Amino acid sequence: MKSLLNKVAIVTGASSGIGRATALLFAQEGVRVVLSARRVAELEVLVNEIESAGGQARFLAGDVCDEVIAQRLVDMAVTDFGGLDIAVNNAGTVGTSRNISDIGLDEWRQVIDTNLTSSFLGAKYQVPAMIERGGGSLIFTSSFVGYSAGMPGMSAYAASKAGQIGLAKALATELGSKGIRSNALLPGGTDTPASITNAPGATPEVLAFVEGIHALKRMATPQEIAQACLFLASSASSFVTGTAFLVDGGVSVNRT
């Protein structure tokens, strides 16, 4: 039986990686999905894939830093599918690895806005629609970086991801009485196009290092992280809110 039949979800950053895998898994579970990313062609392919398999999907291409996009995604969920039950605020960027003294203000703001401010804008419009439904699940894709580990050259990324955890915790207390759960999902290293292991010039040594910092000695697949997202979206996690939910292959505890 499909666990989320006829629920409605927004997934940002859906054109690749964790967002794409989550959109596909949600649709397989009966969720009607509203998808967003900047790349139109990739979103069109994804929607066609979902609909060819019998699912229902819509997309809106745009920048998650744009407040109008955040509002329009919710409007689309309500108009096309009748409401909103789940929001996966997943879009993000790593930014450029630089020492703190070399980061320009524009670079800093771009990472903070893409990762953290977009989460605020998403929630700002998602929450009233969830209240209309009598509850819902807010999910923010954060990271172990800035929570259980620090990495040189990633101060903007770490600050933005730690900020998402703080936002998720605050919203859990603010919205719990309204039936809305709020959690931060903290993946470990995941084999996505945005991973440093797939960056131009990445060497086998880079992959070996990233795999080695995990207790499981490998990276996650996007599908594994999507399964964790499904758990947070579903009634299986009905008493889970305000968490920094680690799905990190043991990177937080590994010392070998």
Image: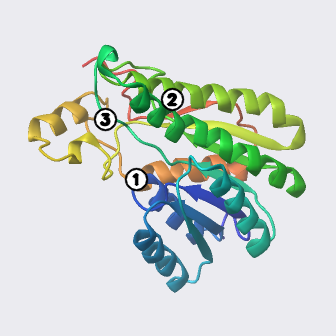
Mark closer to the observer (2, 1)? 2
Task: Label 1: state its secondary structure.
Answer: helix
Task: Label 3: state its secondary structure.
Answer: loop
Residue 172 in view: yes
Gap in angstroms between the C-alphas marked 2 and 1:
21 Å
Lower position in the chain sequence, tag 3 or tag 2? 2
Closer-to-camera residue (135/251): 135
In this picture, residue 152 sits left or right of residue 173: left
Mark closer to the observer (3, 2)? 2
Q: Disc 1 designates what residue?
A: 222
Q: Disc 3 designates what residue?
A: 216
Q: x, y (%) of residue 241?
A: 71, 34
Image height of 143 relative to 235, above or below: above
Q: Disc 2 designates what residue?
A: 160
Count residues near mark 3 (Cα–Cα under 10 Å), then give few for <14, some for 14-19, many for 20+: some
Closer-to-camera residue (102/141): 102
In this picture, residue 185 sits left or right of residue 46: right
Lower position in the chain sequence, tag 2 or tag 1? 2
